[in-house]
């Protein structure tokens, strides 16, 4: 079973009503269903990309899309043989009738769900798009996890590689050789799941939405400004990864990234690049300073 990309995220939010209003009115998602203190939202009718759960902040789970030609049952047998706890879920969120839920390490919840056959990544010329409302991202792009220390990061990366076959693109090391950041991928895109050092209780650094390009980023920043949402940093281009970025906090207390132009890596590149944090500007290729607030997740 080939895994494709991040297709869904479930986030804790402090104020559910305010976050849903922002998601619909400013981000441009559609509310699909409500279940008590939980709301499912999507970019297209019938399929959820985001679930918001009231209470606190941070990441509850994220879901990776799988090739529909694969078999969840065989993946489950392999994971259980490797000692990875997992279970099948029926209708975990709208548009996904079945998913496999597994726990990596002590707390990280990852789901795998078959996805309809479709292009892995769309482009602005793929075909007509519905009228744009608000920021109107094209898709989810990636998730970056908040990790408390070097040991936890190495353990999580090892679990992603062993259980899900993810490859490491880049690692940032501190002066003492401890890992400060790591970016992992499923296919050619530079990263699908990143990991950054955050506070000890932080589970999420940011959730990234894919935009069509630099022009879309400018329109999105204007939409956020009209809604009274200030950018935390950006628009810029990362030194590691190379994608365009803009970051902001949502009313629910989590950080979002608007991402565009994510590079693709050569298919035969297996060895990660290991870089020293003090040797170059990992955050910005354009010399933008990393804001002090960036060390905190949610």
Image (cartoon, rainbow, N blue to C red):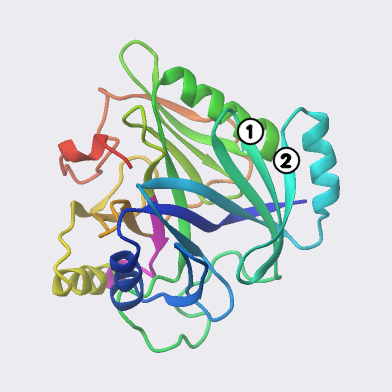
The crowd level at tag 1 (other Cα within 10 Å; few <14, some 14-19, many 20+) is some
Q: How many numbered badges does the structure rendering display?
A: 2
Camera-side residue: 38 or 66?
38
Q: Which residue is mark 1?
A: 161
Label 2 secondary element: strand
What is the x, y in percent for residue 194? 45, 40
Label 1 secondary element: helix
- Magenta stretch: give its range: 207-216
Asked whether, in this view, residue 275 is left or right of residue 114, the answer is left
Residue occupying image coordinates x 35% and y 47%: 56
Q: As displayed, is residue 286 above or below residue 115?
A: above
What is the x, y in percent for residue 251? 25, 60
Proximity of marks 1 and 2: CB atoms separated by less than 8 Å: no
Q: Is residue 212 magenta?
A: yes
- Residue furthest front in the image: 36
What is the x, y in percent for residue 129? 46, 85
The crowd level at tag 2 (other Cα within 10 Å; few <14, some 14-19, many 20+) is some
Quarter the C terminus occupies: top left
Q: Please state which of the two labelled residues, at mark 1 or mark 2, is closer to the viewer.
A: 2
Residue occupying image coordinates x 36% and y 52%: 243
Residue occupying image coordinates x 18% and y 57%: 231
Image quadrant of residue 89? bottom right
> From where the camera sits, is residue 209 visible?
yes
Q: As displayed, is residue 30 above or below residue 185?
A: below
Q: Which mark is residue 86?
A: 2
- Residue furthest top in the image: 176
């Amino acid at each position: 079973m080939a895994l494709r990309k991040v297709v869904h995220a479930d986030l804790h939010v402090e104020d559910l009503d305010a976050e849903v209003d922002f998601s619909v009115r400013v981000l441009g998602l559609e509310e699909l269903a409500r279940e008590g203190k939980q709301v499912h939202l999507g970019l297209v009718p019938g399929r959820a990309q985001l679930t918001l759960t009231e209470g606190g902040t941070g990441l509850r789970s994220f879901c990776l899309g799988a090739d529909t030609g694969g078999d969840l049952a065989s993946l489950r047998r392999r994971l259980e043989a490797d000692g990875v706890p997992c279970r099948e879920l029926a209708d975990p969120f709208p548009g996904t009738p079945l998913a496999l839920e597994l726990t990596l390490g002590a707390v990280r919840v990852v789901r795998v769900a078959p996805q309809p056959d479709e292009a892995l990544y769309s482009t602005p010329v793929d075909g007509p798009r519905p009228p744009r409302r608000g920021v109107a991202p094209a898709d989810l792009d990636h998730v970056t996890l908040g990790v408390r220390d070097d040991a936890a990061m190495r353990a999580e990366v090892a679990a992603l590689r062993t259980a899900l076959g993810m490859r490491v693109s880049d690692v940032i090391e501190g002066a003492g050789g401890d890992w400060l950041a790591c970016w992992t991928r499923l296919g050619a895109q530079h990263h699908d799941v990143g990991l950054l050092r955050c506070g000890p209780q932080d589970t999420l650094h940011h959730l990234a939405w894919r935009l069509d390009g630099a022009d879309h980023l400018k329109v999105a920043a204007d939409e956020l400004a009209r809604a009274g949402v200030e950018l935390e940093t950006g628009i810029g281009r990362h030194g590691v990864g190379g994608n365009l970025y803009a970051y902001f906090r949502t009313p629910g207390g989590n950080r979002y990234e608007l991402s565009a132009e994510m590079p693709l890596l050569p298919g035969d590149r297996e060895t990660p690049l290991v870089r020293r944090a003090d040797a170059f500007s990992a955050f910005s290729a354009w010399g933008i300073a990393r804001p002090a607030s960036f060390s905190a997740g949610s």
